[in-house]
Amino acid sequence: MDSSVEVVYSTDRARRLRIVSWIVAVLAALLAVFSIALAVGGDGDKRATGIFSLCVAAVLLGVSVLAIRLLPGRDRPAKRSAVATGIVSLLAGLLLAGTWLSFVLPLVALGLLFLALLPDENADDEPLGGAST
């Protein structure tokens, strides 16, 4: 890695963001399982609902896995991916109105956005771990 990489998160903040991103990924996987069951076993409107929620789950799973992969770098792309995961989680919760996820996802999303957007004063004190010179 380049020595000019700006560290925006401390290791503790990055670890907490990864935990919340894992929670989002697990919720997305559960949504995908239920959506597949609904799409396969349903008829008409239930099948359409299952396919729609499967698409939402795929997007949610994609952004959360991207955040999980980028957060160990603790740099600007990691911050962007964490914020994107929070925004997509919030929107997914709104899109899935009427389900149990419409309550859980926005709460998780707000926590993720809170952690991602608050400035981390300890970020400058810690060197970027795993950097090869």
Image (tube, rainbow, N blue to C red):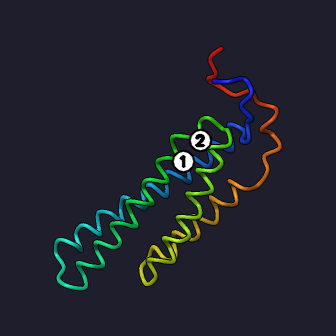
Badge 1 is on which residue? 67
Q: Secondary structure at mark 2?
A: helix
- Locate residue 85: give its quadrant: bottom right
Residue in the picture at 83% in, 43% down: 121
Q: Residue 26 or 40: which is nearer the viewer? A: 40
Find residue 116 and name its label: none
Q: Which residue is at a point 68% across and 53% down the rendered structure image?
A: 116
Report helix, strand or loop for mark 1.
helix
Amino acid type of the residue tagged 2 in the rendering: Leu
- Do the residues under discs 1 and 2 have CB atoms within 8 angstroms? yes
> Is residue 1 rendered to the left or right of residue 67?
right
Q: Quadrant of residue 84?
A: bottom right
Place of residue 83 in the rendered image (x, y in percent of width and height, measured from the top left) = 63, 56
Question: Going by the image, does 93 lie left or right of 44?
Answer: right
Measured as percent of width and height from the top left, residue 73 is found at 62, 35
Q: Residues within 10 Å of mark 1 (few under 14, many from 20)?
A: many
Query: How far is disc 1 from disc 2 in space, using C-alphas?
Result: 6 Å
| Residue drawn where x is 64% and y is 62% of the image | 111
Specify the label residue 71 is tagged with: 2
Q: Which amino acid type is marked by label 1?
A: Ala
